[in-house]
């Protein structure tokens, strides 16, 4: 078995204002191993996004209370980093693709500028160098005319293209871990399949382990090696994908499976 | 920026706005002419007869000192633009920075201090404040500028603060964090540029306000110290009007009126052009 690149132990997320409420994530523990695609599935509102944002350190402390025994990325304990150190790791060692590609890009800058800023920030590249790397990266995620994409504003691109731009930004520094939060739910079915295939292929090529958040069990079956089932903020099942489909153990998994079957029929 | 072309199209379709733009451009050319030393240079010599009628010698006649009213009203365009530009640029800059910082650190002591400062400045009667600043600065020619910048930034500041609070919760800020950009970089590169439309509109509003205020202050003797402006001309004309001479009064008022009308049309058109963009976001 491959070694773990990301280890999460007892991660809990609560709103800072009302700690009496049910936590958005409740003692979440799992391991993401090198080179694997690990699915995180669960009904809407079960805490998938909050778990991801907590791992990324994106939850603002005045609104959310995050506690964890351990969030270890390769050798680094993320919970003990200063904001400066965390900033150097985010986007280079661990990165994230968001649910909504329309709003995740800054409307006033070109896609090229936004991808360049990743190379400038983490690779210390200058203008020319970051431009060349960006063009290459746009080509890598399947744009046939990288030059044109480079000069486009987000609103000029389709949803699928925007999500490819996001993927290019997230994968630019060949991170050890990519968290993809329902990267294709906002897209139509054909585009979904293309974008996902591209993402998984790129992860394989770069040796990036992917935590793939989704509620589509078809996606899980096709791309993931293992799956975590989340319900009410807790991880209720952690299994190989074939086992999950053959012998679901938790009621929440059974419900998900029956919904998926219902959607197909 | 991507929407520049569309904005320009929108502005072109707005007839009143285009007229305003033409007026402002014409005044701007006059101001440039004065700066370049080609126009209105003969504004101070008191060579001619007092209260001469308009004619080939002095197109708008002369004032009570025998100075050429046409030359003076043209030279005043430069005075007006200087004050308008300096005050609008500086107060927009100040409002943008303080508003952005307040919005970014919203509901903290930083935000509280900026709001408190803006509240205090807004509650001081303006002309009293100018008089106090002018007195404190011992009649320095830029006392008026300082007073205006110190009070005019508050409107921009409040608007920018509110906009930054909105922008802060948008997803592209989260994704800027996710690629590891530090807070201050995010604020400067992704938050402030998204307030650009507010800054542009506010700058044009403050520009007009500064020119108007200069006229009133100069009329009251608190404004332009050396040089000439429409406000000083109006102050002179109070003595002349009593004696039945209206040329100075009419020239200064007309020059001021046309510029203000033009600028108001232009800034209305700008606001309209930006509105649909706001709604689309
Ligand atoms: N801004 C917020 N303020 C308060 N509670 C929130 C906020 N955002 C989310 N929550 C709560 O946190 C819980 C987890 O939300 P989260 O966004 O992680 O769900 P999710 O599993 O990603 O759902 P989805 O599949 O719909 O994206 C939800 O029950 C929700 O009520
Ligand atoms: Mg979610």
Image: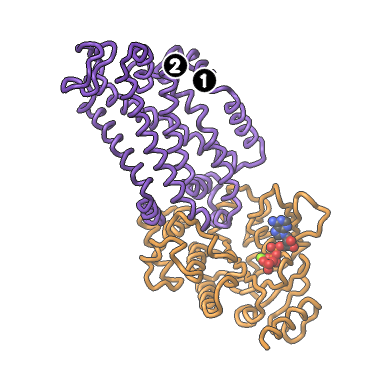
Chain colours: A orange, B purple
Q: Secondary structure at mark 2?
A: loop
Tell me where residue B52 appears, x and y as whole percent: 22, 15
Up the image or down, B84 lies above or below A143; here it is above
Q: Which image quarter: residue B249?
A: top left
Q: Which quarter of the rendering shows the C terminus of chain A?
A: bottom right
Looking at this view, is A99 or A102 the one in front?
A102
List the single residue furthest toward the left: B56
Tell me where residue A200 appears, x and y as whole percent: 55, 75
Task: State the CA–CA distance, disc 1 to disc 2.
Answer: 10 Å
Give the chain letter at badge 1.
B
Q: Which residue is mark 2?
A: B220
- Can you tell me whether the CB of the residue at mark 1 lies under 8 Å from the nearest atom of ligand 1? no
Q: Which residue is mark 1?
A: B127
Left or right of A31 in this view: B59: left
Q: Which quarter of the rendering shows the N terminus of chain A?
A: bottom right
| Earlier residue among tags 1 and 2 | 1
Left or right of B65 in this view: A226: right
Q: Secondary structure at mark 1?
A: helix
List the single residue furthest toward the bottom: A265
Which quarter is ligand 1 in? bottom right
Q: Can residue B180 be seen here?
A: yes
Up the image or down, B243 lies above or below A19; here it is above
Q: Are marks 1 and 2 in contact (CB under 8 Å)?
A: yes
Tell me where residue B69 appears, x and y as whole percent: 26, 20
């Amino acid at each position: 078995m491959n070694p773990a690149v990301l280890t999460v132990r007892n991660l809990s997320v609560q709103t800072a204002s009302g700690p009496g409420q049910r936590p958005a994530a409740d003692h979440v523990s799992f391991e993401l191993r090198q080179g694997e695609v690990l699915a995180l599935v669960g009904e809407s509102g079960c805490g998938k996004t909050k778990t991801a944002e907590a791992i990324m350190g994106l939850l603002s402390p005045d609104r959310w209370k995050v506690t964890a025994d351990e969030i270890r990325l390769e050798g680094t304990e993320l919970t003990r980093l200063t904001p400066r150190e965390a900033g150097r790791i985010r986007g280079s060692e661990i990165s994230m693709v968001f649910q909504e590609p329309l709003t995740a890009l800054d409307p006033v800058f070109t896609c090229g500028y936004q991808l360049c800023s990743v190379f400038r920030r983490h690779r210390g590249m200058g203008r020319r160098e970051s431009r060349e790397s960006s063009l290459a990266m746009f080509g890598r995620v399947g744009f046939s005319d990288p030059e044109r994409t480079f000069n486009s504003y987000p609103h000029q691109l389709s949803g699928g293209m925007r999500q490819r731009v996001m993927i290019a930004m997230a994968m630019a520094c060949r991170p050890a871990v990519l968290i993809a939060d329902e990267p294709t739910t906002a897209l139509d079915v054909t585009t979904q399949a293309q974008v996902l295939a591209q993402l998984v292929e790129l992860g394989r090529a770069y040796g990036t382990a992917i935590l793939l958040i989704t509620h589509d069990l078809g996606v899980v079956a096709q791309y993931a090696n293992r799956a975590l089932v989340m319900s009410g903020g807790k991880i209720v099942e952690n299994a190989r994908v074939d086992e999950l489909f053959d012998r679901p153990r938790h009621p929440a998994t059974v419900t998900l499976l029956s919904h998926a079957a219902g959607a197909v029929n | 920026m991507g929407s520049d072309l569309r904005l320009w199209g929108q502005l072109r379709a707005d007839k009143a706005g285009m007229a305003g733009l033409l007026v402002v451009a014409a005044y701007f050319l006059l101001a440039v002419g004065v700066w370049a030393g080609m126009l209105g240079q003969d504004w101070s010599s008191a060579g001619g007869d007092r209260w001469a009628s308009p004619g080939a010698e002095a197109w708008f006649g002369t004032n009570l000192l025998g100075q050429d009213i046409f030359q003076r009203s043209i030279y005043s365009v430069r005075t007006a633009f200087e004050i308008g530009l300096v005050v609008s640029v500086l107060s927009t800059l100040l409002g943008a920075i303080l508003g952005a910082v307040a919005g970014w650190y919203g509901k903290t002591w930083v935000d509280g201090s900026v709001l408190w400062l803006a509240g205090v400045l807004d509650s001081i009667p303006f002309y009293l404040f100018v008089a106090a600043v002018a007195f404190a600065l011992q009649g320095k020619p830029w006392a008026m500028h300082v007073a205006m910048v110190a009070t005019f930034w508050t409107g921009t500041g409040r608007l920018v603060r509110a906009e930054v609070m909105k922008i802060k919760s948008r997803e592209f800020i989260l994704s800027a964090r996710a690629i590891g950009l530090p807070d201050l970089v995010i604020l400067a590169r992704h938050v402030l540029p998204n307030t650009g439309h507010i800054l542009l509109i506010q700058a044009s509003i403050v520009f007009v306000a500064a020119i108007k205020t200069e006229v009133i202050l100069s009329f009251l003797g608190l404004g332009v110290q050396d040089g000439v402006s429409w406000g000083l001309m109006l102050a002179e004309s109070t003595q002349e009007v009593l004696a039945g001479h209206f040329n100075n009064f009419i020239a200064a008022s007309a020059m001021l009126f046309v510029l203000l009308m033009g600028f108001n049309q232009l800034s209305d058109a700008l606001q309209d052009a930006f509105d649909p963009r706001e709604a689309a976001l």
